[in-house]
């Protein structure tokens, strides 16, 4: 039948999934970065690894990637999703606070590294246009490798981590102007000249960013609100993917990188109530696509060229690493960073980046750089990228494991938010709990699955997030690790039990107060780990009794004392081993003791 799909058509996908299933658990067990595993697997499965042996052993073709170009094309989305997630974790205020490092240190690093590398290329006999292209390609570092490493090491909020991200962000912003400039140089035969045409060529990029900002502010939040009201998890996933890929494509049409468009979309969503739910939804896609990206980098490593020209390739890799590292370290010291932070940032940013392939590829297509030189430089760039995890490990040792407040920049760093009580459910009970916490000046944040309630509360200025509080990763992003307490106010018994169970598993020391439907439900909540469970039926009875006794003349003090006594008796009864068939919780007994 025409168009029939053969099993071998899925071979590359199966190989990638098998690699992910083997590499990630194995390298985590060895306490190594999975990035190294994906890079090594790419070399092994690529045309320069096992693929080079298929002539003598045809059966090896079953273990090699057949379409590396298609893999590389799909792998680009790994960087797109990564930048989107980084945008979600930022905000416009934080980005504004980092402007000194983004537009100061970042611009200086690109300028210095480009100038030094281009000068070296000129001294080796390259034409001016080729030297500029080579300098621009090798001056940019790898966001896709560096940021996941910082996240694994939990150092993204250190001074070195913030500085590194600021420089990487400016590099991403610089890609579009670099590509436009190379296009004009190619048309002019490699002659570098500033002209009105060069300035006009940047207009589509500027208009593209402006269009993304305007359309994003007008469309993104209303669209996600509409999807959230449908209460369909599949539809929400589809909407999130549409936002990431759509923003990337719009950015690409404007002449910018897809990753930059996704980053802007993430920034626009960072201030909305959907931020954490979108993060949880996109995270698995980001992880898989980044793994595919690292695999494609390994596939592209031209091992025969490395063997044929080892001195030239290794020398270029060492040279560009040294130039970039020295430039970052010297400039970081000029920006008054501490020596350890400057050294760590220099090691993280010393390697080449994924945009080297884009820039050198365009330069070779436009005859600015001859193909032999360009391919040798791509191998050198790949080798420098492979070295980044090792350089990052050395940087972490130099930077020190502990991050003190003194290590954060005074003007540029924003203080971490204070721990806040978490309220799961923001109906009538949740709102009252929030009001009481506010009266006592206690910070809180609420999560709710009803999009209409979230929208109403947001308009009133409350801090609410849309999402499912029974998901561990969602609770973690809402600040459970530092929260002094969790209040579960939902009227859904099963939902309340799921949240209590998950929260207790994540935080054995957490104070959890939960709303219960009745005494039997309260006992189940106690068994699952609730510190306190408040049954609606019992509390309603006690309040009715209080009102009745006061109205018939019993003194208020005696009434309040008797109500408190009866409430304590009820709680003790629920914690007896024979109460409603329940068991005494060892955790509660230890706490009371």
Image (cartoon, rainbow, N blue to C red):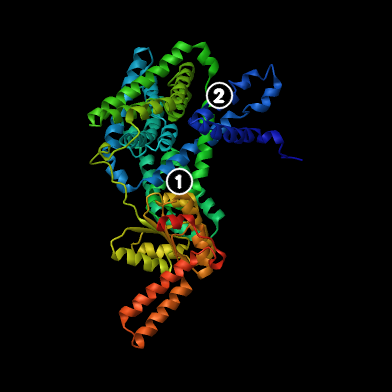
Q: Is residue 408 left or right of residue 523?
A: left
Height in image: 99 above or below 364? below
Q: Residues within 10 Å of mark 2 (few under 14, many from 20)?
A: many
Is residue 278 something that shows in the picture? no
Residue receiving disc 1: 247
**Which residue is rendered at x = 46% and y = 59% of the image?**
530
Q: Quadrant of the C terminus?
A: bottom left
Q: Secondary structure at mark 1?
A: helix
Height in image: 176 above or below 479? above
Q: Quadrant of the N terminus?
A: top right
**Front-most of residues 36 and 229:** 36
Q: Secondary structure at mark 2?
A: helix
Q: Position of residue 517 (x, y in %)?
A: 50, 69
Q: Is residue 448 left or right of residue 561?
A: right
**Front-most of residues 392 and 567:** 567
Q: Residues within 10 Å of mark 1 (few under 14, many from 20)?
A: many
Residue receiving disc 2: 43
Q: Position of residue 398 (x, y in %)?
A: 33, 27
Quarter of the rendering containing residue 260: top left
Q: Are marks 2 and 1 in contact (CB under 8 Å)?
A: no
**Which residue is rendered at x = 39% and y = 41% of the image?**
204
Question: Which of the numbered marks, if any, corresponds to residue 505?
Answer: none
Height in image: 564 above or below 147? below
**Front-most of residues 11 and 258:** 11
Height in image: 8 above or below 92? above
Is residue 153 something that shows in the picture? yes
Of tags 2 and 1, which is closer to the observer? 2
Quarter of the rendering containing residue 380: top left
Label 2 or label 1, whichever comes before in sequence order? 2
**Front-most of residues 281 and 481:** 481
């Amino acid at each position: 039948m025409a168009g029939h799909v053969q099993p071998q058509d899925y071979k590359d996908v199966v190989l990638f999934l098998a690699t992910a299933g083997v590499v990630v658990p194995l390298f985590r067990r060895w306490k190594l970065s999975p990035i190294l595993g994906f890079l090594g697997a790419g070399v092994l499965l690529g045309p320069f690894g096992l693929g080079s042996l298929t002539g003598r052993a045809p059966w090896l073709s079953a273990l090699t990637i057949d379409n590396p170009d298609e893999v590389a094309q799909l792998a680009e989305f790994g960087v797109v999703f990564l930048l989107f997630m980084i945008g979600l974790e930022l905000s416009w205020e934080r980005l504004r606070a980092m402007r000194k490092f983004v537009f100061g240190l970042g611009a200086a690093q690109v300028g210095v590294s480009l100038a030094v590398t281009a000068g070296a290329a000129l001294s080796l006999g390259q034409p001016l246009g080729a030297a500029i292209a080579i300098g621009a390609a090798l001056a940019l570092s790898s966001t896709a490798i560096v940021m996941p490493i910082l996240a694994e090491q939990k150092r993204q909020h250190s001074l070195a981590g913030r500085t590194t991200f600021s420089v990487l962000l400016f590099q991403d912003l610089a890609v579009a102007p670099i590509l436009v400039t190379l296009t004009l140089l190619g048309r002019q035969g490699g002659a570098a000249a500033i002209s009105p045409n060069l300035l006009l060529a940047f207009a589509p990029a500027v208009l593209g960013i402006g269009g993304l900002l305007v359309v994003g502010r007008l469309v993104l939040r209303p669209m996600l609100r509409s999807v959230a009201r449908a209460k369909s998890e599949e539809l929400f996933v589809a909407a999130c993917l549409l936002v990431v890929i759509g923003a990337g494509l719009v950015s690409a049409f404007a002449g910018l990188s897809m990753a930059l468009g996704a980053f802007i979309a993430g920034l626009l969503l960072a201030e909305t109530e959907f931020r954490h739910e979108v993060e949880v939804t996109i995270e698995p896609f980001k992880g898989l696509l980044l793994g595919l990206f690292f695999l494609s980098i390994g596939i592209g490593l031209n091992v025969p060229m490395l063997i044929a020209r080892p001195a030239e390739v290794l020398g270029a890799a060492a040279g560009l690493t040294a130039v970039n590292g020295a430039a970052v370290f010297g400039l970081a010291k000029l920006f008054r960073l501490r020596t350890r932070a400057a050294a760590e940032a220099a090691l993280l940013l010393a390697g080449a980046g994924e945009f080297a392939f884009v820039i050198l590829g365009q330069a070779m297509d436009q005859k600015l750089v001859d193909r032999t030189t360009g391919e040798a430089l791509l191998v050198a760039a790949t080798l420098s990228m492979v070295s980044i995890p090792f350089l990052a490990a050395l940087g972490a040792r130099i930077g020190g494991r502990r991050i003190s407040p003194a290590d954060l920049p005074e003007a540029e760093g924003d203080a971490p938010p204070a721990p806040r009580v978490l309220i799961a459910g923001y109906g009538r009970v949740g709102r009252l709990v929030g009001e009481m916490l506010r009266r006592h000046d206690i910070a809180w944040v609420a999560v709710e699955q009803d999009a209409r309630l979230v929208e109403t509360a947001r308009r009133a200025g409350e801090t609410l997030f849309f999402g499912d509080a029974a998901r561990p990763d969602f609770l973690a992003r809402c600040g459970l690790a530092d929260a002094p307490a969790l209040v579960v106010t939902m009227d859904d018994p099963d939902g309340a039990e799921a949240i209590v169970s998950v929260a207790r598993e994540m935080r054995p020391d957490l104070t959890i107060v939960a709303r219960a439907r009745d005494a039997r439900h309260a006992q189940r909540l106690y068994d699952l780990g609730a510190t306190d469970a408040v049954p609606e039926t019992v509390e309603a009875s006690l309040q009715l009794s209080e009102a009745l006794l006061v109205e018939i003349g019993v003194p208020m003090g005696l009434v309040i004392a008797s109500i408190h006594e009866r409430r304590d008796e009820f709680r003790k009864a629920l914690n007896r081993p024979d109460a409603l068939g329940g068991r005494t919780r060892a955790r509660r007994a230890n706490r009371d003791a």
